[in-house]
Amino acid sequence: MTFDNNLHALWNSDKSGGNINIPHALEKLKSAKMPVDKVRRHLRYEFFMQLAAVIIIGFAPVTLKFNPLLIFPFYLLYFIFVLICGYFFTKLFLFYKNMSNTALTSKDNLYAVYYDIKLSIELYKAFTYCLVPFLVLFIGMIIVNEEKIPVDALFMQGAAISKSQAASVLLVLIGVILGLAVVTELYVNTRYGKYAKQVKRLLDEFREG
Amino acid sequence: MEQHKGIIHKISRMYMDTKDDQDDLAQEIILQLWKSYDNFRHQSSFSTWMYRVALNTALVFFRKDQQQPATTDAVPEIPADETSHTKELQLAHFYQAVQKLERLEKAIIFYHLENYSHREIAENLGITEGNARIKLNRAKTKLKALIQQQGYDF
């Protein structure tokens, strides 16, 4: 018990807090190390990169002098593509504006943090996966255009494609998608997974016993 | 907030071992307090609310690089010539030992030192009272052992 009393006495004797200065321009303070903020800031940055890519893709028909037959299907796809991007964009930016209530009990707060990190990560993954089929189609169109393959012939001969040809196209596609999936999972896990893990470890400390 | 800034300092010193990190954490706590002031609805006392926000911030405050804290086992170098310095030495030993506790244990020790009862600790952390009691006792024993390991006793 003396240890306890001494500790209390010592604690109360610590008056060294006077050198903390509270800045007056609080608005200018930037949160630096809160895990949710960190994850979200990185995600936003990447999101802007992807947005830039989306815009560049939008100019592909002009810069690559697309076959007029390809332009309509291209922009039809592009429109859906932009809609999907818009959905994730609003999710990441607007949905999160008014979150974080740090006055919850510590455990609830940690669960909220954990949930937010996980949700952000999953949102990001879902976004990436949504883009894959579009990118495959866009690249396909660009190849058709660049190789000067007649578009009408493409449709005519589509019926005449052999089973082995179809199978090889399918295999290549599956390979590409699987490869992208593995890269995405690995990337997200190494880059953002650590924050989720840290918070998970903390939550485990709260367990009974 | 001015009159409670000693608390911010103490929490920062419990959670971070280098001066730079402590300053960063103190800044972050001030920012979080400011941001969540809207949530303070006077249903609890100001200090209770403030402790919660500050500790919740400290709990998830991770340093930039993910290396383990380079806690040295060397006794902090503080000239122990006068009696006023014994207090400093004791404090240095205390904070050094606290660095080696788990994050939750630090929070429990903090509440305990602020004279919170088991029930109040439990309420603020969101755990059961029994769990708080067990964890507090464990943390105290651990802390005592750590201080003794440093070749000190009080």
Image (cartoon, coloured by chain):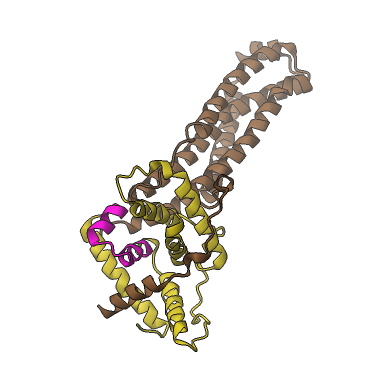
Chain colours: A brown, B yellow
Asked if residue B126 lies in the magenta stretch, the reply is: yes
- From the top left corner, tell me how far across and down residue B68 is, in percent: 50, 66
- Side of B110 relative to A127 (left or right): left
Asked if residue A73 lies in the magenta stretch, the reply is: no
Work out whether A201 lies above or below B78. Answer: above
> Which quarter of the picture shows residue B134?
bottom left
Does residue B68 appear in this view? Answer: no
Work out whether A196 lies above or below A43. Answer: below
Task: Give A139 or B118, whichever is nearer the viewer.
Answer: B118
Residue drawn at the location 52% of the way across and 63% of the way down: B22
Does residue A86 appear in this view? Answer: yes
Q: Which residues are magenta?
A: B106-127
- From the top left corner, tell me how far across and down residue A192 is, in percent: 52, 48
Residue drawn at the location 52% of the way across and 62% of the way down: A20
Task: Give A140 or B122, whichever is nearer the viewer.
Answer: B122
- What is the quadrant of the C terminus of chain A in the image? bottom left
Residue drawn at the location 31% of the way across and 72% of the way down: B140
Secondary structure predominantly adopted by residues drawn in magenta: helix
